[in-house]
Amino acid sequence: MVGYEITYIIDSALPEEQIPKVIERFSEHVTKNGGQIVNIDNWGKRRLAFEIKGKHEGVYVTMRYNSTVKACTELRRVMGIDEEIIRSVIIRVN
């Protein structure tokens, strides 16, 4: 397994009680595909550096995990089509 870190921005227009559910959904996606969560850090609501998809604020979340390349690719695909995610970036961690 390979170590990864993903930072994603959740739409701040979601109700406050929905944010943990979104985070849990992506955590479960990693574990169901054979990965292991190392750490999840919810930074909370922050102002975006520039407007993205008409949004000026978002909830930043960083998740470190270990998984296969195939599972990481699938997570990227799922996040790309999810309307609750404004932006995401995955990096490989040694």
Image: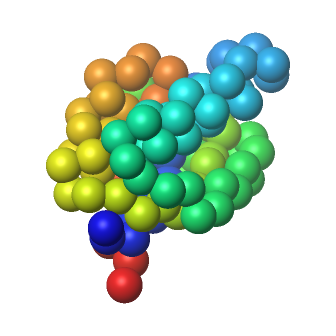
Q: Residue furthest right?
A: 17
Location of residue 67 with respect to 61 vertically, above or below: below
Q: Quarter holding the N terminus?
A: bottom left
Type of colouring: rainbow
**Image: 70 above or below 58:** below
Residue found at x 31% / y 29%: 78
Comparing 84 with 20, the one in front is 20
- Number of residue marks: 0
The answer to whether residue 26 is left or right of residue 45 is left
The residue under the point 72% across, 30% down is: 20
Across and down, in percent, residue 31 comes to: 47, 43
Closer to the camera in the image, 49 or 76: 76
* Residue 33, quarter of picture: top left
Residue at image point 27% right, 46% down: 71
When asked about the image quadrant of residue 3, the answer is: bottom left
Q: Is residue 81 visible?
A: yes
What is the quadrant of the C terminus in the image? bottom left
* Residue 55 in sight here: no
46 above or below 18?
below
**76 or 46, which lies in front?**
76
Q: Nearer the viewer, residue 91 or 60?
A: 91
Residue at position x 25%, y 38% in the image: 74
| Residue 41 higher or lower than 25, as above or below | below
Percent from the top left, x then y, of residue 83?
42, 18
Outermost residue, bottom direction? 94
Q: Is residue 91 left or right of residue 61?
A: left
